[in-house]
C-alpha cells in the first residue's frame, strides 16, 4: 500500500483511541521518510529525539496489544468499539515489514508501534504510558 494511503488509514483508525495506563493518552501517527528503514534502537532514539542512553525495550505486537484486542462479555458498547479499533490497528501495523513495539523510558514511557513501509520509510503510531 502506498505510504500516503497507509498514513490516512492509520489516522482514521486511531481517531478517538486512547492507550490506557495509569493515565490515558491518545495515539499519534509517526512517519520518517529519509531513514532507509533503519529501525535499530540507536537510530530510533535519534529519530524520536531521545537521549542516546534512554532505556528502550522491544515488545512483540501481539503480546503488547493482547488485553486491548480481546473482547470480553462485560465490555460496554464503547469498550467493544475500542476493541474493534485496536484489532484494526494491529492488522494495519502488521502490513508493515518488521512491526514491533518500542517502549522508551521508565515510569513515563513513550511507546512507538512501528514498521517499515513498502516505500522504505518507518511508519506507525506513538502514544505514552505511565507505569509505576
Image: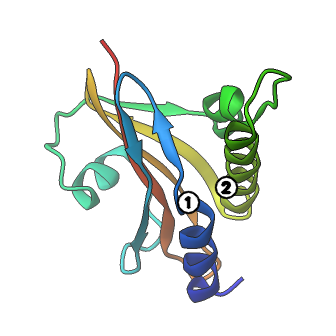
Q: Is residue 64 above or below residue 9?
A: above
Q: 23 and 113: which one is in front? A: 23
Q: Where is residue 87 drawn, in percent x and y?
A: 75, 48
User: What number is the disc on residue 14?
Assistant: 1
88 with respect to 127 (left or right): right
Q: Residue furthest top?
A: 132
* Quadrant of the image containing the N terminus: bottom right
**For numbered disc 1, what is the local secondary structure?**
helix
**For numbered disc 2, what is the local secondary structure?**
helix
43 with respect to 7 (left or right): left
Kindly indicate the quadrant of the structure image that contains residue 30. Answer: bottom left
124 with respect to 9 (left or right): left
Kindly indicate the quadrant of the structure image that contains residue 109. Answer: top left
Q: Where is residue 84 drawn, in percent x and y?
A: 76, 49
Q: How has the structure been colored for display?
A: rainbow
What residue lies at 72% left-to-right and 56% top-to-bottom? 94
Label 2: which residue?
A: 89
Q: 84 and 123: which one is in front? A: 84
Q: Is residue 52 above or below residue 29?
A: above
Q: Where is residue 101 drawn, in percent x and y?
A: 52, 41
What residue lies at 52% left-to-right and 57% top-to-bottom? 16
Q: Where is residue 19 drawn, in percent x and y?
A: 48, 39
User: What number is the disc on residue 116?
Assistant: none
What residue lies at 62% left-to-right and 52% top-to-bottom? 99
User: Label 1 neighbourhood size at 10 Å, few (<14), some (14-19), many (20+)?
Assistant: some
- The answer to whether marks 2 and 1 mark residues whose Cβ atoms lie closer than 8 Å is yes
Q: Earlier in the sequence, mark 2 or mark 1?
A: 1
* Quadrant of the image containing the C terminus: top left
Q: 97 and 106: which one is in front? A: 106
Instruction: Tell me the distance, in whole angstroms, between the alpha carbons under discs 2 and 1.
Output: 7 Å
Amino acid at each position: 500500500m502506498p505510504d500516503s494511503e497507509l498514513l490516512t488509514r492509520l489516522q482514521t483508525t486511531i481517531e478517538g483511541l486512547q492507550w490506557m495506563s495509569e493515565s490515558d493518552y491518545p495515539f499519534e501517527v509517526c512517519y520518517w521518510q529519509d531513514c532507509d528503514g533503519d529501525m535499530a534502537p540507536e537510530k530510533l532514539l535519534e529519530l524520536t529525539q531521545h537521549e542516546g542512553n534512554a532505556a528502550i525495550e522491544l515488545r512483540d505486537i501481539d503480546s503488547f496489544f493482547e488485553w486491548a484486542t480481546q473482547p470480553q462479555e462485560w465490555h460496554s458498547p464503547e469498550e467493544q468499539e475500542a476493541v474493534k479499533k485496536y484489532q484494526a490497528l494491529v492488522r494495519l501495523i502488521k502490513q508493515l515489514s518488521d512491526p514491533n513495539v518500542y517502549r522508551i523510558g521508565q515510569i513515563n514511557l513513550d511507546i512507538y508501534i512501528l514498521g517499515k513501509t513498502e516505500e522504505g520509510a518507518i511508519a506507525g503510531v506513538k502514544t505514552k504510558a505511565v507505569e509505576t
